[in-house]
Amino acid sequence: MVAAAGPISTRIRSFVMRAGRMTAGQEQGWQQGFPQFGLTVAQGELDWDKTFGSPGRRVLEIGFGMGDSLLQMAQAEPETQFVGIEVHRPGVGRLLSRALGLGIRNLRVYAEDAVDVLSQCVAPASLNAVHIFFPDPWHKKRHHKRRLIQPKFIGDLAHLIRGDGYVHLATDWTPYAEHMFDVLDAEPLLINAVGLPRRAVARPDYRPVTKFELRGERLGHAVQDLIYLRASS
């Protein structure tokens, strides 16, 4: 299990809880969808095969935002088990509303802090893939300590990935990409998929292009995809 990063009251979090109100559709999605798709930390360690009803490849997405990528991937791979984590409830409500409308079955969500989910709900060497797409870069130097991608977080995460698994990060902020390379290249349980340090890869076909990404490209922000494989322990 991932060791908790400290007492909840004092831990530096990688997010700020925004007070954004849900739309009527998002609220309806939450009320109708969470009983079907929702998971909680209080339930303890997740039994993936029991939860989804059959064995399957296991993919965890941390910080799925409004859920566009996660939903598209779940649609494209119906035999794969997808679990998403997102603290922003309007985004969760939107994802649940769309999942209900599309009849998606291979998807579950946590609306809680990823550190708590990883430390209490995910068994070691249980994940085939972890996706972290466009995490908040926390641009200001004084806020860099809030960045999700930190040595301890990545070290703990690596222990949850199977020997044939990987972690895939994407960012459109070059200074954050450089920070990601620093952290990932220093983690002994992870190896750059290219075979060389500090190398990004072309966007894999399985990662959808989002409106957020297209907007960044229009602003001149080059997207970098980083994929690191789980090394033999």
Image (cartoon, rainbow, N blue to C red):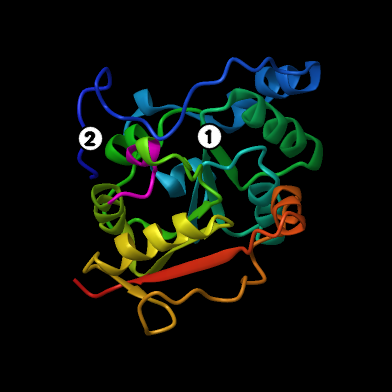
Asked if the stretch drawn in magenta spans residue 166, the answer is no
- The part of the image, by quadrant, that contains residue 187 is bottom left
Q: Residue at x 24, y 67 (%)?
A: 189
Image check: 92 left or right of 12? right
Dot 2: few (<14), some (14–19), or many (≥20) neighbours within 10 Å? some
Q: Which mark is residue 86?
A: 1
- Magenta stretch bounds: 143-150
Q: Quadrant of the C terminus?
A: bottom left
For this rendering, which residue is in front, 34 or 21? Answer: 21
Q: Nearer the viewer, residue 10 or 86?
A: 10
Which residue is rendered at x = 24% and y = 21% of the image? 10
Q: Which residue is mark 2?
A: 4
- Residue 28 placement, left or right of 18: right
Which of pointers 1 and 2 lies earlier in the amino acid sequence? 2
Question: Helix, strand, or loop for circle 2?
Answer: loop
User: Residue at the location (61% across, 63% down)?
Assistant: 223
> Is residue 149 highlighted in magenta?
yes
In this view of the protein, which residue sits in the foreground, 11 or 78? 11
Q: What x and y, as percent, mark residue 231?
A: 27, 74
Left or right, residue 213 beside residue 178:
right
**Residue at (56% x, 20% y) in the render:** 18
